[in-house]
Image: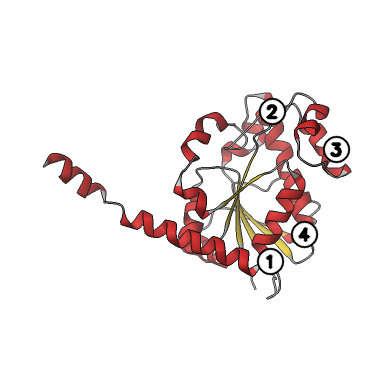
């Protein structure tokens, strides 16, 4: 109600940190990715229809939100209680950081999580289009033309794909969220739509989250590990 949403509307929650903004980047590809990816994503979210809203929590609003219009809601830092309320009210938590604390909070709260990554490296638009499994729309391709040269990332916009990929391979955490290639337009849109509107898909991911949380809770505590080591 605070955001003007009705019962039939859907809310995505996106968090950001200072390191993800273009003005703080010192490497040109990072600056370009920080500047262009939000617009790429927001344009696709807008295509999901007028019922889809996004609330962005971060140090400042993102540029490139025009396609969402008044369905883009920005909030600066919030007290923990208010953040928890917003998180539990969200239908989907969107992240571009493999290790985001917000994603772990969403999993614990039973909120579906979509992690956007990029595994593609290309110097030109033609090279990138040749790698993608499906041709993007004209508008998406035009934005990709501004993004290249493009480099893989699991922590946007800095990269860390080579470092984080082995850590996530066979990691039970992978089952508690959905991972999607953000430059694959159709896959990104279809996954967002399913996690927002498909009751069976939402129930499946929530069951996986619950199973993962049970695994984590069954782990020994730090005190137990230290006591066992000392004994």
The circle on residue 48 is: 4
SS category of the residue bearing label 3: helix
- Residue 143: name its quadrant: top right
Measured in 3D between alpha carbons, the distance from the residue under mark 4 to the one under mark 2, in whole angstroms, is 27 Å
Q: Is residue 35 visible?
A: yes
Q: Which residue in the protein does label 2 denote?
A: 121
Measured from the top left, where is residue 188 in percent x and y?
71, 49
Measured in 3D between alpha carbons, the distance from the residue under mark 3 to the one under mark 1, in whole angstroms, is 29 Å
Which is nearer the N-term, disc 4 or disc 3? 4
**Which residue shows up at 74% across the image and 38% down it?**
36
**Which residue shows up at 53% across the image and 57% down it?**
78
Relative horizontal placement of residue 218, taking residue 9 as reference (left or right): left
Q: Which residue in the protein does label 3 denote?
A: 142
Crowding at label 2, few (<14), some or many (≥20) Cα neighbours within 10 Å? Answer: some
**Which residue shows up at 73% across the image and 55% down it?**
190
Q: Which residue in the protein does label 1 denote?
A: 197
Which is nearer the N-term, disc 4 or disc 1? 4
Which is nearer the N-term, disc 1 or disc 2? 2
Measured in 3D between alpha carbons, the distance from the residue under mark 4 to the one under mark 1, in whole angstroms, is 10 Å
SS category of the residue bearing label 1: helix
Q: Is the residue under label 3 in contact with that under label 4 (CB below 8 Å)?
A: no
Relative horizontal placement of residue 100, taking residue 71 as reference (left or right): left
């Amino acid at each position: 109600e605070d955001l003007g949403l009705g019962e039939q509307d859907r809310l995505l929650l996106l968090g950001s940190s200072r390191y993800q903004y273009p003005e703080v980047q010192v490497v040109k590809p990072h600056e370009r990715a920080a500047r262009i990816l939000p617009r790429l994503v927001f344009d696709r979210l807008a295509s999901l229809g007028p019922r889809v809203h996004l609330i962005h929590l971060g140090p400042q609003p993102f540029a490139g939100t025009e396609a969402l219009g008044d369905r883009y809601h920005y909030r600066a830092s919030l007290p923990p209680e208010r953040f928890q309320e917003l998180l539990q009210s969200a239908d989907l938590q969107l992240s571009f950081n493999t290790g985001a604390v917000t994603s772990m909070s969403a999993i614990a709260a039973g909120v579906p999580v979509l992690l956007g990554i990029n595994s593609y490296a290309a110097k030109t638009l033609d090279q990138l289009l040749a790698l993608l499994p499906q041709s993007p729309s004209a508008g998406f391709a035009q934005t990709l033309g501004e993004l290249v040269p493009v480099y893989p990332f699991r922590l946007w916009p800095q990269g860390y794909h080579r470092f984080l990929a082995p850590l996530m391979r066979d990691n039970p955490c992978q089952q508690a969220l959905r991972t999607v290639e953000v430059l694959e337009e159709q896959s990104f849109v279809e996954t967002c739509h399913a996690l927002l509107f498909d009751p069976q898909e939402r129930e499946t991911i929530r069951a996986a989250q619950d199973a993962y949380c049970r695994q984590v809770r069954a782990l020994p505590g730090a005190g137990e590990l230290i006591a066992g080591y000392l004994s």
